[in-house]
């Protein structure tokens, strides 16, 4: 067999041409996207709007109409007869924050020496980091909405923030809070359209599966399953568990939170905080309707890579550009410890 050059099969190339790492990068990027979706809890629990350009988006807010019995012969158009509804209007503007990035650098020599692939591990960590920051920002905005005392339109409703005076660490306390949440939403005419939800810490969620609990009691139509470890719904409110809520409470005082959130373009707490940061040390659980909080998305989650000859390694970056804000505070409920 003659010696000489040969043409190898480059498993990272597309159709045997171009970048030798093209397919490897796609795997890395896909892992980031998948991990972000798996770790993120709030993405589908609030209102999201995408824009192709600009620095902000406007959300129109409308009030309610009135009704009155008509007296035969009276002119409905005569303002003095008070038949016409003066429906109030307002708008909420949500600004785009700076680009949020999560990145890592992989040196060639380290990859060659290593006996296992670190790209998959790093991809998951990058995805988890972005998912956590997204969730925490939306959750903090939700708390701010629940604590908002000024309606968006005249005659509207404010948010609901309830000081329970207990630790919300028993099934009875948690169920009472969930029924209280449903009552508050009903009293503020928030639609009961199947989208109501609550986010609990894992400890709170699993408390609902303890014995002698109506959440799993079939006699009162409880749908919880001890064997599966699930409680889908209480009081018509879908239940979700997230460690991110516990992380939020653990952060507590504003000084302990991500300080770059102070520089956010949206000041959701107003005079009671800075940017997305406020004192959330006594937050117990949150919930309501997706109309409470909005996200404006300028750049969806995307990935980039750059091989540096000078540094003999590859820089991987995951990023997004978006912003969060309060839309309808009456749709947000917080139960405090």
Image (cartoon, rainbow, N blue to C red):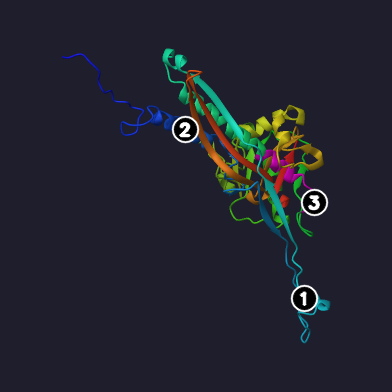
| Region of the chain picked out in magenta, as a range | 138-151
Chain-order first, disc 3 or disc 2: 2
Q: Residues within 10 Å of mark 2 (few under 14, many from 20)?
A: many
| Real-space CA distance between mark 2 and mark 1, rounded to the nearest whole angstrom | 59 Å
Chain-order first, disc 3 or disc 1: 1
**Residue 65 x/y as whole percent:** 73, 67
Chain-order first, disc 2 or disc 1: 2
Dot 3 falls on a residue whose secondary structure is loop
Q: Is 120 rendered above or below residue 261?
A: above
Asked if the magenta segment contains residue 302, the reply would be: no
Q: Quadrant of the C terminus?
A: top right
Q: Is 258 rendered above or below residue 216?
A: above
Q: Is 305 rendered above or below residue 312?
A: below
Q: Which residue is mark 2?
A: 29
Q: In terms of depth relative to the viewer, which is nearer, 211 or 175?
A: 175
Identify the residue at image location x=74%, y=41%: 267
Identify the residue at image location x=40%, y=27%: 21
Q: Which residue, as the protein is rendered here, is positioned at the far right?
A: 80
Q: Which residue is mark 3?
A: 150
Dot 2 falls on a residue whose secondary structure is helix
Contact flag, marks 3 and 2 (Cβ < 8 Å): no
In-image side of 23 versus 82 (left or right):
left
In-image side of 240 versus 152 (left or right):
left
Q: Residues within 10 Å of mark 1 (few under 14, many from 20)?
A: some
Asked if the magenta segment contains residue 143, the reply would be: yes
């Amino acid at each position: 067999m003659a010696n000489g050059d040969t043409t190898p099969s480059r498993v990272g190339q597309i159709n045997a041409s171009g970048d030798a790492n093209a397919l490897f990068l796609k795997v890395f990027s896909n892992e980031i996207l998948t991990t972000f979706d798996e770790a993120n809890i709030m993405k589908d629990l609030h209102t999201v709007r995408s824009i192709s350009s600009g620095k902000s988006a406007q959300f129109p807010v409308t009030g309610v109409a009135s009704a009155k019995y008509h007296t035969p012969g009276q002119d409905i158009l005569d303002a003095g007869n008070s038949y016409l509804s003066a429906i109030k209007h307002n708008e909420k503007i949500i600004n785009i924050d700076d680009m949020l990035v999560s990145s890592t650098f992989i040196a060639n020599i380290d990859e060659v020496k290593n006996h296992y692939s670190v790209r998959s591990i790093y991809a998951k960590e990058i995805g988890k980091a972005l998912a956590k920051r997204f969730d925490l920002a939306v959750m903090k905005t939700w708390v701010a909405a629940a604590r908002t005392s000024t309606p968006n339109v005249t005659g509207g409703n404010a948010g609901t923030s309830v000081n329970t005076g207990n630790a919300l660490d028993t099934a009875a306390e948690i169920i009472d809070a969930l029924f209280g949440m449903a009552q508050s939403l009903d009293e503020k005419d928030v639609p009961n359209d199947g989208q109501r939800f609550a986010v609990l810490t894992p400890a709170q969620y699993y408390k609902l599966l303890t014995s002698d609990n109506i959440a799993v009691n079939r006699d009162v139509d409880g749908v919880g399953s001890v064997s599966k470890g699930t409680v889908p719904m209480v009081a018509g409110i879908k239940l979700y568990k997230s460690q991110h809520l516990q992380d939020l409470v653990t952060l507590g005082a504003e000084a302990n939170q991500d300080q770059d959130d102070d520089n956010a373009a949206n000041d959701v707490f107003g005079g009671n905080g800075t940017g997305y940061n406020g004192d959330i040390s006594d937050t117990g659980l949150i919930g309501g309707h997706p109309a409470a909080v909005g996200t404006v998305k300028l750049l969806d989650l995307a990935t980039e890579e750059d091989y540096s000859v000078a540094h003999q390694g590859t820089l991987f970056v995951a990023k997004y550009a978006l912003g969060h804000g309060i839309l309808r505070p009456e749709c947000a409920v917080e139960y405090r410890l």
